[in-house]
Amino acid sequence: MRQLTKVDSLNQDIASLVTKDDQGKRLDCSICNYHIGAHHQSLLAKFYCNVRAFKNETFHVWRCPRCRNIHCLEIVDLDFYYSRYPIAEAVSSPVLRACFSNTLRRFKKHGFSQSHAFLDYGCGGTGLFVQYLQKAGFTRSYGYDPYSSNPQFNDPKNLQQGPFDYILLQDVIEHVEDPEGLLQKLDSLLAPGGYILIATSNADNIDLSKPHLAEYYNEVHVPYHLCIYTPESLEKLGNDQKWQMVEFFDRPFHDLMIGMNSRAWNQYIRLFDGSLDVIYEPIKVWKAITSVKFWFYAIFGYWLSFRTNMTMMLRKDH
């Protein structure tokens, strides 16, 4: 990832963006329908893509002044960008399994057992969490991801294994153009009294004036994140499906107290090229342990979290 020294250099030439042809731009808030126009130039900020294959490309985002959700301005051919998406290369590791245990604990707290039916919707192509659950004895666990190249997870028939008692929507809702349509679909798959865990970036805690910081550009994640929600907006989307929030976490599943937490992850990728790809490549232990900053964040990063990610557990009425 290119290191930037002046925020102003990122925001050059944006003044004319919303005055040009509106085609190919996301100008309406998906939550409150607020529309931006030529007089909203100050809302725009420029971010580099954090995927290595497209790291020299820039995109613009804007924060809705009414509901504070963050939107990616440019509408692009996402199939093209997903064709080089690093998560498709992810492999299981002890660190990742420790993170998965964090998610499993959150489900178990709300009654999840080996007898329940579980769906990981948008399972990241490789379905690593589903495989983790199956090995742990949760045999009624299924995954579905339309972008997966693995026939085990891109088959829509997996959705017919429901209704599901528990559904995971991990880092998915911010990738879709129609969040209400997605949640309506999931509501039809969720059993009465069932639980859905939605994990996503937290728009409230993202500073758009600091696009050079990995803690922010990894959450903005242009052009893949179409809309980043506030906790209030996410809860409203759930309430519209008649789901009730039963627990809120202001941390992601990979924010472990000691070791790999969000600050440590971001410091680790800074040791290389700053791209998201670094996370999904084999861990280079020697590179990490020779970095004083990495050790500092590995030990203290949990308490220094920017809290730019959130997880919300919601329950469907009987």
Image: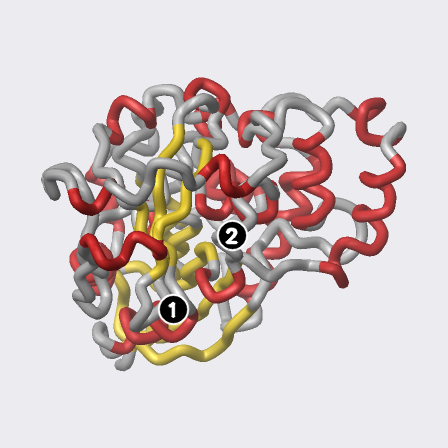
The residue beneath circle 2 is: 209
Which residue is found at the position 54% from the left and 31% from the top? 276
Q: Hey, which quadrant is residue 145 in on the image? A: top left
Which residue is found at the position 86% from the left and 47% from the top? 296
Secondary structure found at label 2: loop
Which residue is found at the position 45% from the left and 57% from the top? 199
Which residue is found at the position 20% from the left and 53% from the top? 38
Mark pair 1, 2: CA separation: 36 Å
- Examine the rendered structure and indicate whether residue 235 appears above or below residue 48: below
Tell whether 250 sits left or right of 21: right
Q: Quadrant of the C terminus?
A: bottom left
Which amino acid type is marked by label 2?
Answer: Ser
Secondary structure found at label 1: strand
248 or 263, nearer to the observer = 263
Q: Hey, which quadrant is residue 233 in on the image? A: bottom left
119 or 96, nearer to the observer = 96
Q: Position of residue 310 (x, y in %)?
A: 51, 62
Q: Position of residue 254 (x, y in %)?
A: 62, 49
- Examine the rendered structure and indicate whether residue 186 appears above or below residue 25: below
Which badge, 1 or 2, is on the more N-terminal residue? 1
The residue beneath circle 1 is: 195
Judging from the image, the colouring scheme is secondary structure
212 or 10, nearer to the observer = 10
Mark nearest the camera among 1 and 2 is 2
